[in-house]
Image (spheres, rainbow, N blue to C red):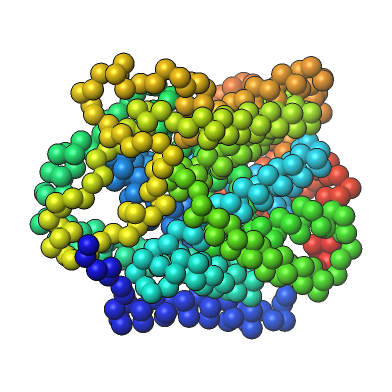
């Protein structure tokens, strides 16, 4: 076996410079804003952030280590069908711009889950925020683990030491500098990711003798499976799984996740927020403070709120470190693990917001039961799949042996990541390489429950539809809301553009009164006019808003 390749002196200097700069950004904003330590400035940058760094920050949120390291691994193992991943953000971005961004700015939410308390009941807010906190902790633990694994592969650091270094620096600059530090560090890191990706693409092509050889190798190994539109939901990934399941997952992130909503709210206007289309710790601490602490202790002083925010950030950083250590003990690819968890909770989360925005007759019981049933049903399938294991036929694994590869021998290097858990595709079952010409009856096992064989990439879509269906049925049983008495500020009609006839727009309001002309949301103007139809806020929401206003002053 050839020697493992480590960073050179120049590589280490560049790496250290990036760490020092990230730390500097956090310390800089902590010093600069030391006399403006308010919750609004800490979590939302006083709602005056520029759209450009926020847009880059959102890009980094979507294109994290899971994409930079995990997606190429998925492509290597399962084929070029993963190219559809690049198209899955289009529809979620459109939906966010048309419906969710105007609503979020109109209501000036403390967290995205405050909407659920306004629309339904406090219990809906607590349930959703609690589920999202647990889901995000697992997700963020994974995003810390993956770069740590890569770092340990090219430096003398062990994986555990790399985890401690990565999570420690992220926690420090986030806790010290708040959202401003997070956004500007993300903007800086987006440049590194872009340059690094382009450099790897060029260098990789040079090593194997040009892009023509790359294409020839892909065709030779059967990896050009882009146009695989198999309707069988048991197949791990096809073009259809990306265009349905993954789109649903990204729609949840773009429309109703706190890290993204927090960036929307940091823009001064709706127009800037629409343009924008490591923050996890900052967003989680915002959720803990706004969704769980302030509703019970609304009179907390500004100083105490800031102390709680920063202590919460440190505690969350420690939890993420532990989760990262545990990631190395899991089977299956990292993307499978994360999408299983996020899909099981994200689809029902999107479902309850969909019920709130577009189904005015849905009541609090429908939303609560719908989300609970959707989440439990998805986790039931996920846990059943983990216990049963997958039929290897449906995973369609490509040949992954590098024996005799001239490129690896010519560069005198190994790829430690290929032997680590990042592509430990399924160590509990025998390896089977997919053979397009093989007879299905000779491979397919008859002892599996088909429900548990459904691809994890469909979990989010399943959770979305189960939540919507159950939510409407339960609302019908327990008594639908009277849509004519509902608050119009809490709804966004599916069709409300002036290019449509008035009767069509009236139909899609489903009986909800229209907003007064002075309250209509205009593009680029987030400030509503008079209170023609005041919001019916709960006592907790009012008290928290008063507390936040007092802190901002």
Give the vertical position of 231 relative to 187 (above or below).
above
Give the vertical position of 504 relative to 66 (above or below).
above
Give the vertical position of 86 relative to 172 (above or below).
above
Q: In the rendered view of the protein, which quadrant contains the N terminus?
A: bottom left
Residue 272 visible in this rendered orientation of the protein: no
Residue at the image point whose x is 64% and y is 65% from the top: 318
Q: Is residue 544 left or right of residue 9?
A: right
Locate residue 259: give its quadrant: bottom right
Locate residue 285: give its quadrant: bottom right
Residue at the image point whose x is 33% and y is 50% from the top: 72
Give the vertical position of 93 relative to 178 (above or below).
above
Q: Is residue 325 left or right of residue 434?
A: right
- Tell me how many marks there are: 0
Tell me where residue 223 appears, x and y as whole percent.
23, 38
Locate residue 373: give its quadrant: top right
Residue 135 visible in this rendered orientation of the protein: yes
Tell me where residue 249 appears, x and y as whole percent.
51, 39
Out of 349 and 333, give the one closest to the viewer.
333
Tell me where residue 295 appears, x and y as whole percent.
84, 53
Tell me where residue 431 appears, x and y as whole percent.
33, 37
Residue at the image point whose x is 58% and y is 51% from the top: 138
Out of 98 and 420, give the one closest to the viewer.
420
Q: In the rendered view of the protein, which quadrant contains the C terminus?
A: bottom right
Residue at the image point whose x is 86% and y is 50% from the top: 540
């Amino acid at each position: 076996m050839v020697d493992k390749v480590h960073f050179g002196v120049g590589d280490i200097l560049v790496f250290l410079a990036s760490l020092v700069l990230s730390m500097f950004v956090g310390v800089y904003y902590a010093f600069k804003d030391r006399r403006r330590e308010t919750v609004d400035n800490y979590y939302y940058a006083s709602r005056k952030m520029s759209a450009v760094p926020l847009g880059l920050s959102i890009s980094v949120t979507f294109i994290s280590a899971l994409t930079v390291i995990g997606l190429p691994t998925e492509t290597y193992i399962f084929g070029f069908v993963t190219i559809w991943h690049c198209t899955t953000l289009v529809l979620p971005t459109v939906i966010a711009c048309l419906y969710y961004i105007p609503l979020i700015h109109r209501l000036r939410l403390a967290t995205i889950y405050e909407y659920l308390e306004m629309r339904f009941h406090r219990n809906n807010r607590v349930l959703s925020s609690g589920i999202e906190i647990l889901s995000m902790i697992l997700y963020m633990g994974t995003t810390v683990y993956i770069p740590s694994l890569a770092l340990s592969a090219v430096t003398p650091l062990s994986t555990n030491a790399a985890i401690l270094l990565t999570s420690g620096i992220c926690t420090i600059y986030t806790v010290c500098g708040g959202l401003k530090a997070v956004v500007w560090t993300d903007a800086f890191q987006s440049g590194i990711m872009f340059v690094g990706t382009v450099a790897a693409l060029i260098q990789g092509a040079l090593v194997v003798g040009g892009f023509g050889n790359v294409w020839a190798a892909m065709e030779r190994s059967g990896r050009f499976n882009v146009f695989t539109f198999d309707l069988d939901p048991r197949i791990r990934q096809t073009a259809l799984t990306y265009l349905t399941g993954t789109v649903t997952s990204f729609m949840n992130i773009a429309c109703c996740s706190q890290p993204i909503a927090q960036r929307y709210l940091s823009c001064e206007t709706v127009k800037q927020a629409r343009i924008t289309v490591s923050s996890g710790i900052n967003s989680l601490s915002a959720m803990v403070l706004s969704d769980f602490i302030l509703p019970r202790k609304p009179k907390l002083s500004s100083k105490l709120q800031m102390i709680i925010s920063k202590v919460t950030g440190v505690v969350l950083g420690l939890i993420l470190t532990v989760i990262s250590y545990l990631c190395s003990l899991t089977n299956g690819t990292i993307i499978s693990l994360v999408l299983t968890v996020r899909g099981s909770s994200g689809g029902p989360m999107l479902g309850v917001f969909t019920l709130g925005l577009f189904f005015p007759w849905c009541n609090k019981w429908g939303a609560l039961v719908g989300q609970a049933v959707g989440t439990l049903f998805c986790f039931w399938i996920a846990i059943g799949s983990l216990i049963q294991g997958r039929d290897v036929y449906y995973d369609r694994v490509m040949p992954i042996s590098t024996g005799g590869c001239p490129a690896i021998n010519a560069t005198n290097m190994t790829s430690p990541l290929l032997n680590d858990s990042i592509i430990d595709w399924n160590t509990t079952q025998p390896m089977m390489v997919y053979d397009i010409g093989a007879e299905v009856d000779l491979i397919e096992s008859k002892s599996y429950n088909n429900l548990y064989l459904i691809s994890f990439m469909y979990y989010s879509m399943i959770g979305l539809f189960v939540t919507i269906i159950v939510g409407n049925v339960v609302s019908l049983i327990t008594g639908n809301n009277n849509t004519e008495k509902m608050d119009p500020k809490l709804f966004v009609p599916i069709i409300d553009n002036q290019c449509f006839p008035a009767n069509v727009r009236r139909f899609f309001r489903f009986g909800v009164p229209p907003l007064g002309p002075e309250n209509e949301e205009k593009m680029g103007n987030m400030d509503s006019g008079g209170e023609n139809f005041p919001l019916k806020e709960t006592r907790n929401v009012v008290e928290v808003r008063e507390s936040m206003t007092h802190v901002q002053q």
